[in-house]
Image (cartoon, rainbow, N blue to C red):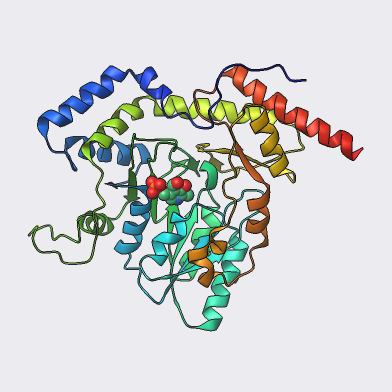
Amino acid sequence: MTDKYTGKINLFDCATAQKVIGQENFLAAFKTVLDHGAYCQGPETKEVETKLANYSGVNYCATNSSGTDALILALMAWGVKPGDAVFVSSFTFVASAECAAILGATPIFVDSDPNTYNMDPADLQRAIDEVKKEGKLNLKAVVAVDIFGSPCDLDKIMKIAHENGMKVLEDAAQAYGSTYNGKKAGAAADMVATSFYPTKPLACYGDGGATFTNSKEEYDLLVSCRVHGMSPEDHYDNVRLGLTGRLDSFQGAVLLQKLKVFDEELVKRAKIAKKYDTELSSYFGKQKILDNATSAYGLYTINCEDRDELMAYLKEHNIPCGAYYPRPVNTQTAYKKWNTRSLPVCEKLSKTVLSIPMHPYLEEDAQNYVINTMNEFAAKKAKVAA
Ligand SMILES: Cc1ncc(COP(=O)(O)O)c(C=O)c1O
């Protein structure tokens, strides 16, 4: 019988960083914004863009009002429109596909690799061949998601996309802080979008996101599109369609504070993940991280045939957990019209995955309790099977 843990365990922890950084530092930063009054895209926003571009090792970062807007703006900058095919993993948060659909393009759903849970390059190739054979859509872009913070197979995905005249937008919403081939997230694809939603590895206290590029031309388009397609010369001449997609100065101020502890937080997440990797029973499948990548561990997600039973068991033991995602995007009501391909791995994952507590401030006792409770569940299952 697992010893009871009496503290509260959180699946995510958005609050402890305030204590670690010092709430007074947030309040002082907010007062600065109140005093200067440039609430939208003020000096904090500009400073954080410079810091993020430097952190990622890219030329440009344009911050946005959300990760979803970051994705939409990237596709707008590439001129995605009706008649275009945008290839996207289906085992993801809806925004990865929504960004294409909202611009009138056709999302083509691609299956996942059963070990990494990310886009399967072989199925991407199959999906491209099918669209080419049908000859109705223009091959335009691939949205490649880094699910749970773990980079997708960009070398293969970019090769396939580029051979077919397409660009790759990496959806690193859950993966800011990860690395691929030694490059930080933001630098490894043609354009990269991320989210600063409160549960993300680098989080603000509200909505926020950013798009990264090395191209001045793309950056200028991102900047124009995030303010209604404004001309840089004449702010009352909107030269293309756009939206209100800016990051406000308060969230910029939060991110500047959060960046102070971001690297330490990533180290803590990796340490917690390593302990789960080594101490959780082999009854639970673990997400494979590519050899040439490191995960930001936005989530720690196992897979298990008895997922729903395990979920109930953990809840009974006051351990929060979540099934991300219980429905692949292609099966959701608004997306069924694009549900044209068979995606057996996505379907299976949606029934077996479970995310367990993962955040930098998860205490060792709490993690031991999670591990022991899960291993107890696994032992009970093994006994029944014997
Ligand atoms: C994979 C993925 N893409 C995009 C988004 C959208 O980000 P936001 O919630 O900031 O719009 C999220 C957020 O949950 C996400 O997990």
Left/right of residue 120 with respect to residue 233 in the rendered view: right
Image quadrant assignment for residue 381: top right
Residue drawn at 34 percent across, 47 percent down? 66
Residue positioned most to the front? 316
Residue 152 screen position, x and y as percent: 54, 50
For the point 35% across and 58% down, the residue is 72
Q: Whole-percent x and y of residue 62?
A: 27, 48
Image coords of residue 361 (percent x, y): 50, 23
Q: Nearer the viewer, residue 142 or 68?
A: 68
Number of numbered markers:
0
Decide: is 85 above or below 159.
below
Camera-nearest residue between 140 and 333: 333
Image quarter hosting the C terminus: top right
Tell me the quarter of the image containing the N terminus. Answer: top right
At 23% from the left edge and 66% from the top edge, which residue is drawn? 241
> Horizontally, is 13 left or right of 324 in the view?
left
Q: Residue furthest right?
A: 386
Q: Name the one closer to the observer, 195 or 373.
A: 373
The picture quadrant where one finds residue 235 is bottom left
Q: Position of residue 280 (x, y in %)?
A: 71, 30
Q: Is residue 384 left or right of residue 216?
A: right
Query: Is residue 150 at least partly visible in the picture?
Result: no
Quadrant in which residue 63 is drawn: top left
Q: Is residue 209 above or below residue 100?
A: above
Task: Please say whether residue 197 is visible from this viewpoint.
Answer: yes
